Amino acid sequence: MRWLPFGTFWQVTLDMVFSADVPSGFGHAYGPEAAQLWADILAPDGWDDAVTHWVQNALSAQPGDE
């Protein structure tokens, strides 16, 4: 990417605005599946599928869910 003071600023700004609609799993919107990815990468001691599902559910929760 080449930095052009005015043009690059607006290009990056507009890219950030429209990147909010990217579905989970694409771009930098990983969503709940990130728990499985990190569990596979780090392989923490004592970590099992039940813990992964708990983390995924916590990441999927909407504000006000209890």
Image (spheres, rainbow, N blue to C red):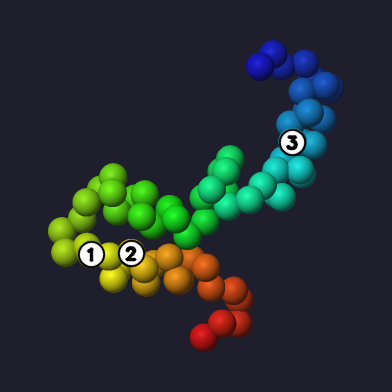
Q: Nearer the viewer, residue 52 or 12?
A: 52
Q: Specify the quadrant of the image occupied by residue 62.
A: bottom right
Residue 14 locus on image (x, y percent): 79, 37
Q: Nearer the viewer, residue 53 or 64?
A: 53
Q: Amino acid at mark 3?
A: Asp
Mark 3–mark 1 contact, CB under 8 Å? no
The structure residue drawn at horizontal position 52% and vertical position 56%, both measured from the top left corner, is 31
Which label number is shown at residue 52? Answer: 2
Residue 29 locus on image (x, y percent): 57, 49
Residue 10 locus on image (x, y percent): 82, 30
| Residue that label 1 marks | 48
Camera-nearest label, 3 or 1: 1
Residue with the most extreme left position: 45
Q: Secondary structure at mark 2?
A: helix
Q: Amino acid at mark 2?
A: Thr
Q: Is residue 12 above or below residue 7?
A: below
- Mark earlier in primary sequence (3, 1): 3
The structure residue drawn at horizontal position 52% and vertical position 68%, both measured from the top left corner, is 60
Instruction: Say how many tags the image has.
Output: 3
Residue 44 locus on image (x, y percent): 20, 55
Q: Is residue 47 left or right of residue 16?
A: left
Q: Secondary structure at mark 1?
A: loop
Q: Secondary structure at mark 3?
A: helix
| Residue that label 3 marks | 15
Q: Amino acid at mark 1?
A: Asp
The structure residue drawn at horizontal position 43% and vertical position 65%, both measured from the top left corner, is 56
Q: Specify the quadrant of the image occupied by residue 13.
A: top right
Mark 1–mark 2 contact, CB under 8 Å? yes
Q: Quadrant of the N terminus?
A: top right
